[in-house]
Amino acid sequence: MTDPRSTLISTAAHFYQLGWMVGTAGNLSAQVSDGSFWITASGHNKGQLGINDFLRIDTDGTVLEQPAPDIRPSAETSIHQVIYALFPEAKACYHIHSIEANLVSGFTDGDKLPLPPLEMLKGLGIWSENPQVDIPVFANHLEVRKIADDICDRFKNTPPPMSALLIRNHGLTVWANSPDSARNYVEIVEYIFRYIVAARQVGI
């Protein structure tokens, strides 16, 4: 059972430096061979994580490993559970809070945001000519379990076109078959979000 925590630590530090996980915002998780997953602890600075800033969670939400009684799993743990349940190929799930993600979530009133047909979409598995593709958008709720339920209800009937979703005025969530791929997905989607914001500013 390979321990992914060192990879999650370095990725969190990278995202922190980019301003995508400022303070204690955001959460990262990665599965291990038995289906459980390590996830960042709630309220811990993502630029200064250590090996004891994670908990191991079973598929049903049971805490399997906890470094101290007062360390709690991320508030978004239920979203990670749903993603792993819906997409068996997913081995990592990353959630960040960026300025661009929050800005573009306000560019649509519906439940999806059209993405420009950029070459970068190939990095998300979109290989069609001049693709017309949307990223799913979900309403934010104070009770995170409600967000997780909304994701489950929509995706169990209609799988998304890419391994990414946007929570309005909250942040971006991606999942992938490895921690490295999940990191790439975050960077690609954030590039697209920055393009959308810049295009609006110059009137494209």
Image (spheres, rainbow, N blue to C red):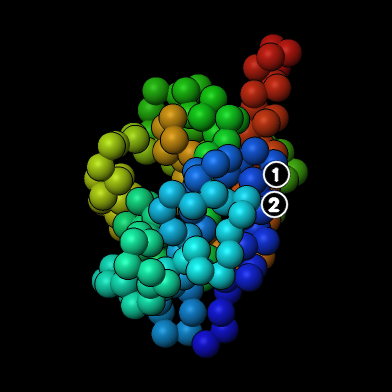
Mark 1: few/some/many CA within 10 Å (<14, 14-19, 20+) = few
Asked if one can make out residue 154 in the rendered structure from this viewpoint, the answer is: no
Vertical placement of 159 versus 30: above or below? above
Asked if one can make out residue 53 in the rendered structure from this viewpoint, the answer is: yes
> What amino acid is at disc 1?
Gln
The secondary structure type at the circle numbered 2 is helix
Residue 75 in the image: x percent, y percent?
35, 51
Q: Residue at x 25, y 42 (%)?
A: 143
Q: Residue at x 57, y 83 (%)?
A: 2
Residue 180 in the image: x percent, y percent?
66, 65
Which residue, given by chain and number where applicable, does mark 2 sit on? 14
> What amino acid is at disc 2?
His
Q: Is residue 127 left or right of residue 161?
A: right
Please identify the quarter of the rendering in which residue 198 is found. top right
Q: Label 2, label 1: how many angstroms apart (C-alpha)?
A: 5 Å
Residue 122 in the image: x percent, y percent?
69, 52
Q: Residue at x 38, y 28 (%)?
A: 110
Vertical placement of 75 versus 64: above or below? above
Quadrant holding the C terminus: top right
Which residue, given by chain and number where applicable, does mark 1 sit on? 17
Mark 2: few/some/many CA within 10 Å (<14, 14-19, 20+) = some
Check whether the beta carbons of the residues at disc 2 and disc 1 lie within 8 A of each other. Answer: yes
Q: Residue at x 49, y 52 (%)?
A: 44
The secondary structure type at the circle numbered 1 is helix
